[in-house]
Amino acid sequence: RYIAMGRPHLDCRSRPELFLNARGGPLTRAGAFLILRRLAEKAGLEPRRVHPHLLRHSFATHLLEGGADLRSVQEMLGHADLSTTELYTHISDRRRRELYFHAHPHARGKATPQGTRSDDA
């Protein structure tokens, strides 16, 4: 919707940047910070903990939790070295427990944190 309706309204000079500010100039890092902090506050989140790079972390985490392999995430993030991707992608505690109860031989058949048996899946 932004690309189809919002951006053309802001773009008076045919700029190549995807995101523009209210005056039609490129959205700066500081501008992105300000927007995210305002949105975080409206959502009841701690504004000081929300920053643009957090979106990359969230993107990578959601991909991994959705079943994407680390190599594919590396490509999507544009990292030359896989170890860079490994440094700041993490698996949530919930997902780690799910994987343990699903895959570890000593955990199979035991109750998972959600109360279901791991061999019922």
Image (spheres, rainbow, N blue to C red):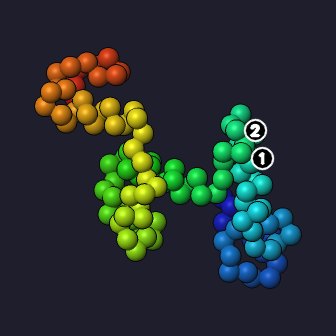
Spatial CA distance of label 1 from label 2 is 6 Å
- Split into 4 quadrants, where in the image is the N terminus? bottom right
Foreground: 75 or 88?
Answer: 88
Numbered label attached to residue 97: none
Q: Amino acid at mark 1?
A: Arg
Q: Is residue 76 left or right of residue 14?
A: left
- Horizontal placement of 1 versus 21: left or right? left
Q: What number is the disc on residue 38?
A: 1
Residue at the image position 32 percent from the left and 32 percent from the top:
97
Task: Indicate the quadrant where residue 23 lies.
Answer: bottom right
Q: Which residue in the rendered view is the most extreme toward the left?
A: 105
Mark 1, secondary structure of its residue: helix
The answer to whether residue 56 is left or right of residue 117 is right
In the displayed structure, 81 sits above or below 1; it is below
Q: Residue at x 68, y 76 (%)?
A: 17
Marks 1 and 2: CB-CB under 8 Å?
A: yes
Q: Where residue 102 sits: x, y (%)?
A: 22, 33
When the figure is inspected, residue 80 is found, relative to residue 36, above or below; the finding is: below
Q: Using the rendered image of the protein, determine whether residue 74 is visible from the camera's viewpoint.
A: yes
Say whether residue 5 is visible.
Answer: no
Q: Which mark is residue 42?
A: 2
What type is the residue that disc 2 sits on? Lys
> Which class describes the residues within 10 Å of circle 1: few (<14), some (14-19), or many (20+)?
some
105 relative position to 87: left or right = left
**Disc 2: CA contacts within 10 A as few (<14), some (14-19) or many (>=20):** few
Q: Position of residue 109 (x, y in %)?
A: 16, 21
- 39 in relation to 19, above or below: above
**Residue 38 rendering spot, x and y as whole percentages:** 77, 46
| Residue 85 lies in quadrant | bottom left
